[in-house]
């Protein structure tokens, strides 16, 4: 079991007299000191608007930005650094994909296939593409444990499907999608596959070559990096034929009064001033995760998941949503305290300094599918320990007591 919370300043600096039990890393992870320092150092020593000036300081900023791009490319096994497009977050990455791939390349008669488990950021953009282009938006449905049957995949990944966009790890169920099977079936019919890795990259190594997906999106802030930077990876030949998403400064080659030509990848998709400080922080986050090593991260989180599931399933007043097999869940457990509204649960836990999330988790179609309006969600990071789970469990007992139940 890792015990590294002292590498994360927030746990010391949050309060002089309160101890925080942070179980909301799926919303955003806390940042190690090295990430905070990398961003600070950029602003202290290298701040300039990249790609523009030709003086030393500007070259430094540009180099930091491009080194971060190369680091991300290496981290996820991309062949070319220009396959890495920096966005603000996963949401912007999916909007880029929807507007630069969905809008121009999909039309009536085509199908966009997603799952009912998607986060809204991998759902609303496709609704908009479907409305604008006349393409149909079709859903894959899982069983109650969050698993998709072969029959469901085979019957829905069929002629007419041009784009499949699915989660890697669900932000509610914590389950892994059958991405190898999805990719195999989709590629057989010439469809492209986009993967939402926002909830997988903090927990498991990602290799775009092995996954053979066409696009991947993730956010820096969920993988111990800063807010304000995310990534869209795309296969070069696809990105090259896509028109720009946002337009303006820096994404052009030549501009006349009526027409423009666009810069080559990746700048075609990176208009306006870039978030170099966040790129420096993301680089440091990758270094941090690589220094820890995914083998240690996964072993630690598996141990935590086994412990948490074991303790929670012993509480008779808790209902868990999705599989109770800890080996099939990554990072998150969704649950409710029976007969207690999730917001009441989260408020009472909050009074005990236990931070969890309650609500629809930006997955309203999934809530409806589970016959819920909302639920609670706890989620782990590398800094959590079994003590955090013990604190949570004691606080859940308090919830029951305060809400008037004997146990
Ligand atoms: C699975 C999944 N996809 C996408 C997102 C959106 O991430 P962001 O808000 O960083 O754009 C989230 C955020 O919680 C998520 O869990």
Image: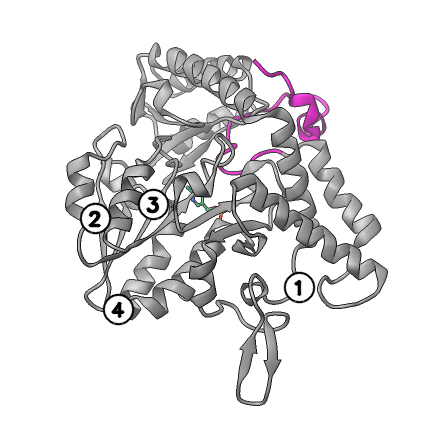
Mark 4 residue element: loop
SS at circle 2: loop
Label 1 Cα neighbours within 10 Å, binned few <14 / some 14-19 / many ≥20: few
Mark yes or no: residue 406 visible.
no
Who comes first in sequence, dot 3 or dot 4?
4
- Return the residue at label 3: 166
Q: Quadrant of the C terminus?
A: top left
Query: Could you tell which of marks 2 and 4 lies nearer the N-terminus?
Result: 4
Residue 395, image x and y in percent?
Answer: 47, 17
Which residue in the protein does label 1 denote?
273
Q: From the image, state whether disc 2 or disc 1 is nearer to you.
A: 2
Q: Is residue 74 left or right of residue 333?
A: right
On residue 174, which mark appears?
Answer: none
What's the magenta bit mostly, secondary-structure-wise?
loop
Q: Which residue is mark 2?
A: 157
Q: CA distance from mark 2 to mark 4?
A: 17 Å
**For residue 316, above or below residue 42:** above
Cα distance between the residues tagged 2 and 1: 40 Å
Give me the residue at 57% from left, 46% from top: 73
Q: Which sits earlier in the primary sequence, circle 1 or circle 3?
A: 3
Q: What's drawn in magenta, residue-wise?
A: 1-30
């Amino acid at each position: 079991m890792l015990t590294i919370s002292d590498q994360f300043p927030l746990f010391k600096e949050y309060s002089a007299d309160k101890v925080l039990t942070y179980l909301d890393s799926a919303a955003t992870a806390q940042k190690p000191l090295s990430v905070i320092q990398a961003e600070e150092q950029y602003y202290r020593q290298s701040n300039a608007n990249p790609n523009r000036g030709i003086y030393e300081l500007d070259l430094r900023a540009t180099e930091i930005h491009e080194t971060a791009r190369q680091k991300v490319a290496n981290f996820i096994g991309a062949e070319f650094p220009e396959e890495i497009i920096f966005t603000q977050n996963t949401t912007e990455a999916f909007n880029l994909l929807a507007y630069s791939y969905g809008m121009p390349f999909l039309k009536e008669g085509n199908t966009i296939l997603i799952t009912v488990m998607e986060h809204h950021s991998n759902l609303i953009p496709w609704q908009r593409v479907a409305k604008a282009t006349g393409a149909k938006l079709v859903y894959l449905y899982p069983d109650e444990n969050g698993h998709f049957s072969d029959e469901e995949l085979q019957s829905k990944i069929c002629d007419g499907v041009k784009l499949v966009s699915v989660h890697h790890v669900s932000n509610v169920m914590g389950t892994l999608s059958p991405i190898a099977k999805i990719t195999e079936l989709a590629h057989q019919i010439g469809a492209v596959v986009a993967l939402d890795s926002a909830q997988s990259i903090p927990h498991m190594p990602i290799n775009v070559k092995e996954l053979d997906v066409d696009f991947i999106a993730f956010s820096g802030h969920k993988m111990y990096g800063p807010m304000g930077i995310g990534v869209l990876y795309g296969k070069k030949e696809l990105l090259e034929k896509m028109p720009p998403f946002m337009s303006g400064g820096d994404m052009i080659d030549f501009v006349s009064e009526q027409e423009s030509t666009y810069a080559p990848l990746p700048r075609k998709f990176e208009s306006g001033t870039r978030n170099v400080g966040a790129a420096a922080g993301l680089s440091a986050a990758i270094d941090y995760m690589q220094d820890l090593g995914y083998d240690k991260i996964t072993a630690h989180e598996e141990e935590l998941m086994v412990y948490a599931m074991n303790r929670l399933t012993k509480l008779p007043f808790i209902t868990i949503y999705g599989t109770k097999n800890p080996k099939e869940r990554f990072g998150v457990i969704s649950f409710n305290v029976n007969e207690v509204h999730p917001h009441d649960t989260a408020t009472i836990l909050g009074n005990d300094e236990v931070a969890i999330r309650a609500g629809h988790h930006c997955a309203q179609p999934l809530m409806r599918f589970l016959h819920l309006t909302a639920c609670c969600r706890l989620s782990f990071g590398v800094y959590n320990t079994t003590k955090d789970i013990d604190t949570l469990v004691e606080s859940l007992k308090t919830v029951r007591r305060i809400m008037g139940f004997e146990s």
